[in-house]
Structures are given as structure tokens and as C-alpha cells.
Amino acid sequence: MDSKAPDGNAEFSFASNTPRSTGRKGLPKIQTQDHNKKASDVCHDDSGTPVKATTIDELHSLQRKKSAPTTPIKGSQGAFNAIPEEERQKQQVQSISASLASLMRETGPKLVKGDPSRKGEGQQISHHHHYTPTISISDSALKLTHYLYNLSPAELYEQAIKTEKGSFIASSGALATLSGAKTGRSPRDKRVVRDETTEDDLWWGKGSPNIEMDEHTFMVNRERAVDYLNSLDKVFVNDQFLNWDPENRIKVRIVSARAYHSLFMHNMCIRPTPEELEDFGTPDFTIYNAGQFPCNRYTHHMTSSTSIDINLARKEMVILGTQYAGEMKKGLFGLMHYLMPKRQILSLHSGCNMGKDGDVALFFGLSGTGKTTLSTDHNRYLIGDDEHCWSENGVSNIEGGCYAKCIDLSREKEPDIWNAIKFGTVLENVVLDEHTREVDYMDSSVTENTRAAYPIDYIPNAKIPCVGPHPKNIILLACDAFGVLPPVSKLSLAQTMYHFISGYTALPGTEDGIKEPQATFSACFGAAFIMMHPTRYAAMLSEKMQKHGATGWLVNTGWSGGSYGSGKRIKLAYTRRIIDAIHSGSLLNANYKKTEVFGLEIPTEIEGVPFRNLGSCEHLDRQECIQGHPIEAGGSFPEEFRCVHKL
Ligand SMILES: Nc1ncnc2c1ncn2[C@@H]1O[C@H](COP(=O)(O)OP(=O)(O)OP(=O)(O)O)[C@@H](O)[C@H]1O
Ligand SMILES: O=C([O-])CC(=O)C(=O)O
Ligand SMILES: [Ca+2]
Ligand SMILES: [Mn+2]
């Protein structure tokens, strides 16, 4: 990465990276009529060229074209140290066998690549083993496990629809699916192995998100997950990357039972090119997702049927008893919160975008405060919506996709997210019309925490590769249901650190079982994911902000001047204008006054934001109060209306 301004710098130049935003010149015209065609050429049912197949099976085999290799197969090109395709397949089977091996038994698993229901359709059966579907083998040592490796979205759709109840193709083309009983993360069931490696490095005890577990218990759960996965007909394997910073890229393998999980991770992690996949080798970290299978409550430490276990020494994570896909995403984020600070790189629960002049903004905030919504800005380049690293070289996205909340989603307010919900996108726990398969985003019958997971390039102005220079603005988002915080305030470095460490928000949570708004203080705006003590991250943030001259802001995306129940949430359109004024630099130069309560610097006015005293609820518009309070005639600003809400 390079931290220079975009002018003339390929790394940050947009023209080559965003062809979608430019005009589509030079596309061939579609021929709708062939004027040379004579009337006698008109096709009749029996006059077409017959299909080149004599049986139905042959016809079906014609339907599937063999993908041309995207890179020449090196072996056949006579390259020197190239591995022949057959050898590469053998290595892949060995690598995945090693991942799925029981640590207690000497035999197995016996792996076969391909779909068990499509025997003979071009699947590669590993040497010696032959699938014998007529014999039902109960002995795990003899049973074969099929694995489906880095399937494409289309293949994963088919798998999901064939075998996972609750999978539907929504009218938009997205794959609608259910995550089962858990529709949010389970932070009370997130455990981390405490051993010599982690004893001193990690944050333990009161306030820490890391519930400790011992190595032995981890192995019990690991074995349980591996046995479960091997007992299935087939498992999905994804080999992918984390972190767009090439120097700090992490290789991850996800072994899962559901096509939904495989597609989710396909979208959320960085997708390797075929060339990169050839050299993938051994993963740096492996997730075993056996979420349909519970943990055993007789097992030490288990307090429910759910356990999400991280073992940093073994570089493994085991998921039992929850199918909520966000556990995988956030489990890997936890890993980055451990690995990156060890390399002096700050990991951040933040969104990130960049203006046309290369000015980068970070958006911190707890779940639901607006990181995804506000970083997805049609006038700026999206670097990422949720997880980033800030290194000596600048910022890089950890992920390859976005995970947007979609409750009450509308095309008008969030057009880019709306348009990203199309073929390939996973739509979790939404409600759809049983006939038209149209999604009702207002419907929270399954959960308030409905989600869409899509590859970042589904956003037209995504910045690929997802890296950028050092941030200029650090925007702390708080969704304040109590209406205490002003809509925006400028922070000193000390105030930024104070708010970063306390991480205040009050909104309906993502986490399982929390539905009513409640005040939350979550260190680093993501205490559930940090691994070390919050001051460690805060110190790095402070140091980086000082070094690169970044300005801190506190933006309230919730209620202001009146609490939840007595008004409405601040309109997204107004929040966007506040954010625009931060990006443009106009807010930096505005007039400020200090509030008595927090000593916060509050701008006296913001262009396009119809309220005058930003610290109280005299917030008026020509037509309405920003918070939806009733208005009456006779106010002094802007002309004649006044909000009647009394503080
Ligand atoms: N004034 C506002 N500012 C930002 N978001 C708002 C505002 N009013 C309503 N919203 C809604 O709040 C939600 C913010 O969710 P968003 O997905 O951006 O959260 P997030 O911070 O990315 O959370 P997570 O970390 O869980 O992904 C969206 O549904 C958005 O439409
Ligand atoms: O992890 C999830 O479920 C969604 C998310 O981004 C968060 O909660 O911060
Ligand atoms: Ca988000
Ligand atoms: Mn998040």
C-alpha cells in the first residue's frame, strides 16, 4: 500500500477501478430483427436443428459446460515446477482430510470431492474410494464424506434450495434463508481458550468478552463438531482470505454443513482468484461450523446448547448450537483483533469510505448505529462497511463483503444497498410473499435483525482493492434512544478517546434476546470482538490520530433532545447532511458553542440541516421538526414554525 494522494497514484486512482460508474460506451447494439431473413426461414417446431443428444441424460450433460481453466494448466504447458492437476487435487484432498480428521481415531475421514447426489457427473473421486450408495454404512471409519469446495453462488443456490428448508429465491434474485433458532450473535457463549499463549496477551475477567475455557474442553467440542460434520453426506469447504493489505493477508478455511453458510462466507471474505487458490496451501485459521448440532451440557463450562469456541494456539474456531452466520464473520474479526495489534496494526469495528480527493473517513459504532448505512454513500468510494485495519500504510478492509441490516430498508433512502440485493446476495430471516417471493422489509416476524450479505463489488462505487490512505475524520456513531446527545459535536483528542473507550449507544440490539432499547457501553464500539484490553486499542488510535492529524466527531444517529417514545429517530437524510458537512470540511470551520453538560463543541448551524440550536429541541423545519414532534406557527426559525416539544 501507498499512502500518497490519489493524483497519479495507481493504488488510489479510481478511473481504472470503477468502470461501472462511467458511461457504457462501445457496447454492441443488440440485433432485434434480421432483415435478410426470408419468410421461408421462419422456424417451425420441427424445423430447428435437433439437439446433439440422444438421451435425456446426455442432454442434461450438455447443459453443463466445463469451465475453461482461467489460467493455463501449468503442467501441460511444460512449466518447470508446476504441479500437475491430478497432484493438486490429491493435495487438496489431503489438506481437507487433515482439517476434518478426528484427533482420537486413526482412520478417516474418507473424503470425496463433489456432490453425493450427482454421482458420476464429473465429480472427482479420490483414489481407491468408491461411493457405494446402496449400503448404508454406520461405521464412521468406513463412511465417505463428500466435500464441496469453493462452490460458485449458483451452485450454492442449488444446494440450498434442494436441501435446506426455508431457502427461496427472492424476486430480486437474492437467496432468502433462515438462520434457525438464533437470529443474532450469542456473546454469552463465546469462549476463548486460556493457555500459556493467551494468558498474558488477552483481556480476562470482569468486563472482558472472552469467557475462558480450557484446552481439553475445546478439544471435546472440536471432536463433537468434526464428528458431526463427518457424519453428514457432504460438507462445504471455503478457502478464502481476510484483509486487503497484501502484507497482512490471512488465509482462512471454513468447513460448514450448510450451503447458506458457504455462500455467506463466499460473500463476506475476500474471494481468491483461481491462481491464488492454486497456491493456497495450509490455512492460517480454520472454522468448524457445526451450528445445527448442540454442544453437550455435561461438558465442562457449557451453560447452554450453544458454544462458539476460539483456540488461538491451534488457530481454530468451533461453532456448536447456532446457525447465525454472523458468528463466523465476527469470530474471524476477533482473530484479527488478536493478530493485528501484535503487528502494531490497529483493528477497528468501523466502516470506511473515501472522497474523490482521497479523504478517508472511519465510522465507528455499535451494531445498528449506521456504519454500513453511512459508509455506503453514493458520492464516495466504499472501502468497507464493518471491519478495518489501520497500519503504517493506511487503512485496509478485512472483508470482501458487506452485511447490511435490512429492517425497514427502502429503495429511496438506501438505494445502493437496495440494488445490492440481487442474485448472489444472502438475505437472512426476511419475510417474503409466498407467491411473488417479494420481500417485505417492514416485516420483523422472524427477527428485527434481518440482514443482507453481499460482495462489496455489488456496491457500484466500491474501491477495489479495498484500501486507502490514512483517515482524516474519525466519526463516532452513537444511536441515543434517550435523546441526551446532540446530533453532532466536534471532539478533542481526549474526548475522542473517552467516547471510544466508553462506546455509548442505546438502541434495539442485534444480540440474541435483546429487543428493547437499552443503554450500552461497549469499549472500542465493539467490546464483544476485542481480545486485548481496550486501552491497548485506544492507545494505538490516539497515537495514529495524532500522527496523521485526524479529527474526531460524535454523531448521534438516534434521538436528540427528546427520548425514544416522545419523538422519532433523526432522519437519515439529515444525518447524511451532517456527515457531508464533516467530509467537505465545512463543519470543521463552523461556529461552535460548548454545552455545559458534556463540554461538547456543538456547531451553531449546519447547511441543509433544519435546526438552529443543535443542543436542544427547537429543531425546526419549514414543515416539520427533525424529530417528528408536533409543530406550531409562530416560531422564529426558519420562518414561522416551531416545534412544541418541551425538553
Ligand atoms: N439517522 C440515521 N442514521 C443512520 N442510520 C439510520 C438513521 N435512521 C435510521 N437508520 C437505520 O438504522 C440502521 C443502521 O444500521 P447499519 O446496518 O448501518 O448498522 P451498523 O452500524 O452497520 O451495524 P452492524 O455492525 O451490526 O452491521 C439502518 O437500518 C438504517 O436505515
Ligand atoms: O455480528 C453481527 O451480527 C452483525 C454486526 O456486524 C455486529 O453486530 O456488529
Ligand atoms: Ca454493518
Ligand atoms: Mn458490525
Image: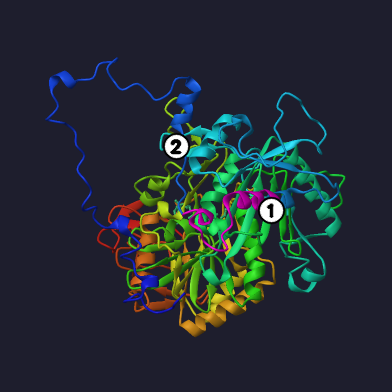
Q: Is residue 212 left or right of residue 536?
A: right
Residue that badge 2 annotates: 65
Residue 86 in the magenta stretch? The answer is: yes
First in sequence: mark 1 or mark 2?
Answer: 2
Is the residue under label 2 in contact with that under label 1 (CB below 8 Å)?
no
Element class at badge 2? loop
Q: How many numbered marks appear?
A: 2
Q: Is residue 240 above or below residue 33?
A: below
Dot 1: element: helix
Please tell me which residue is depicted at 73% across the width and 65% down the height of the picture. 207
Q: Which residue is mark 1?
A: 95
Question: Disc 1 and disc 2: Cα gap in Å?
Answer: 28 Å
Main secondary structure found in the magenta portion: helix
Q: Nearer the viewer, residue 442 or 564?
A: 442
Q: Is residue 205 left or right of residue 546?
A: right
**Which residue is depicted at the point 70% across and 51% down?**
94
x, y percent for residue 74: 51, 57
Seen from this angle, which residue lies furthest front? 78
Residue type at mark 2 is: Lys
Read off the magenta span.
72-95
